[in-house]
Image (cartoon, grey):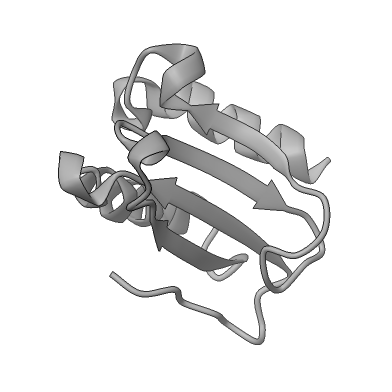
Amino acid sequence: IESRIKESAPHSIKFLYCGNCGYVIEVIEAIAVIETVFSGQFSYCIYDDTTPSGNGRLVCTVYKGQKNDHGEGVMIHSKASSGQYIAADYPTFLALLEDALN
């Protein structure tokens, strides 16, 4: 999966995930859900963390007003912190995403 930069999108989201863990599916599904609610509002910066410390990593960070993942973002999901996948609670994930934009 590759990053998807949309010039017209006012914000961006960075996904950092463990590819060896199969989390790319989590990222693809999360983007599909985001696009149903926030169509065209985000560019997506997507990174497969292949470092040894990235094992099990699934992190989502929002960059309000940024077309890429530079600057200060707001982390809205961490599998390490929450103990769950994004898909386990889409309503909370989307609420956190909306909060990050306000």
Can the viewer see residue 69 in this picture? Answer: yes
Image quadrant in which the N terminus is located:
bottom left
Can the viewer see residue 22 in this picture? Answer: no
Residue depicted at x 55% and y 55%: 14
Residue 79 drawn above or below residue 73: above
Residue 45 drawn above or below residue 87: below
44 on left or right of 47: right
Residue 93 drawn above or below residue 98: above
Where residue 89 sits, quadrant-wise, is top left
Q: Farthest residue in the front direction? A: 52
Q: Nearer the viewer, residue 50 or 41?
A: 50
Residue depicted at x 65% and y 75%: 9
Image quadrant in which the C terminus is located:
top right
Where residue 65 sits, quadrant-wise, is bottom right
Q: Tell me where residue 18 appears, x and y as whole percent.
A: 30, 44
77 on left or right of 22: right
Q: Tell me where residue 16 appears, x and y as whole percent.
A: 45, 49
Residue depicted at x 34% and y 40%: 52
Count numbered badges in the picture.
0
41 on left or right of 26: right
Q: Farthest residue in the bottom direction? A: 7
Q: Tell me where residue 41 appears, x and y as whole percent.
A: 62, 65
Q: Tell me where residue 55 appears, x and y as whole percent.
A: 31, 35
